[in-house]
Image (cartoon, grey):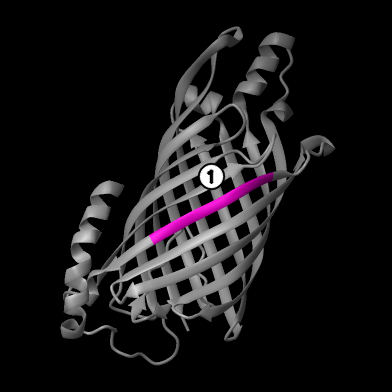
Amino acid sequence: MNSYLAVVLVAALPAAALAQQEVGAAAPAEDGRTAPVLNGHLFSPSVLVDSPFRETTFKLGILYGFGKATGQKYDRNGPVPGETVDYTFAAFAQTFRYEYQFLDWLSAGVLAVTTLYSGIDGPSVVSVGAEVGVGAGARVKAGHQFGPVQTAIVFDVSSAPEYGFLVAAALIKAIQQGVIDAGSALQATHAVTVNPVLAAAWAPIPALGLTANVGYVYKYLRLSGGAVTTGQNAFQIGGVLDFDFGKVSSVPVAVVAGSKLITPLGDGGIPKIEDYSIGFSYTARRRLGLNLEIGRRDFTIREGLDSNGTLAQLGLQYYW
């Protein structure tokens, strides 16, 4: 899919450059602020990267997904040593973000997010159980434009209690010890995450834009029962390419494609997360961002459950 998209973009670039003067390099002017524009290109939002543009905006994201998780196999006596099986799960998440631009180079905002992963058939409900997270955070963004490139340093801090409902753990304890302990099915984790990111955006022509991120992730975990793990570290890199067909035709739609990688640093680092997505964005209204992204994620729901799934996210963003 990524190779096919690259061929299409390479073929379209010469035509885009020739057609820009005929079609017009920018959308009709609107009062107030609009979505980020650089060199005549209207940048489409994406869930994979942070934008370097300082802005006043509200964003709502709704995510749905499904996939499989490879984990321990169980029988009536408990775990089967050395054997694994694939379980199925569903995912749901909501994101609410508000950001306010104080100065040309400075903006700040707040974030609220809810997440849910759950098994969706009998064996999966028992083995995967459910993971529920409710978090909040804040960010500061400071940046400057260097020639044709817009840049910013984005500093995010978030706090998210997560609750795991481990049905298998309670059943195993009941079988092995003859004790029914509902408390053993609940695992509570509190995570504080610090994420500084360097973001940059460039538009070589009005139809084409590129946004890239490089960052560091630090996560501090406090487990149920008062146990504290050492901090976890990871390196983050991501990039998104968006091509606006509204600049070369009468179709106000942009194609957005990208990837993001979070990879652990050192032993006991943050588990690896790998994302790929392709999507579409409506570009006729410069104060409104409306996009749909469909992608694949390889990650770990929790330790012992290597997971991958297909995710679809609908995003709605408004600019003042």
Count of marks overlaid on the render? 1
Q: Is residue 56 visible?
A: no
Position in image of residue 65 (x %, y %):
41, 44
* Vertical relation: 141 (above or below) 34: above
Is residue 116 or residue 227 the one in the foreground? 227
- Residue 267, picture quadrant: top right
**Of 114 and 279, the residue lying toward us:** 279
Q: Give the range drawn in magenta.
A: 233-240
Q: Give above or below for 244 relative to 213.
A: below
Residue 270 among magenta residues: no
Q: Which amino acid lies under the numbered mark 1 shown in the image of this protein? A: Leu
- Residue 164 lies, in percent from the top left, at 63, 36
Q: Main secondary structure of the magenta part?
A: strand
Residue found at x 49% / y 75%: 150
Left or right, 28 with respect to 307, comes to left
Q: Residue at x 51, y 16 (%)?
A: 84
Judge left or right: residue 204 versus residue 88. Answer: left
Q: In the displayed structure, would residue 179 be above or below residue 260?
A: above
The answer to whether residue 240 is left or right of residue 160 is left
Outermost right residue:
226
Q: In which quarter of the image is residue 195?
A: bottom right
Asked whether the viewer can see residue 2, the reply is yes
For disc 1, the marked residue is 116
Question: What percent of the width, then of the height, locates residue 211?
Answer: 44, 65
Q: Callout 1: helix, strand or loop?
A: strand
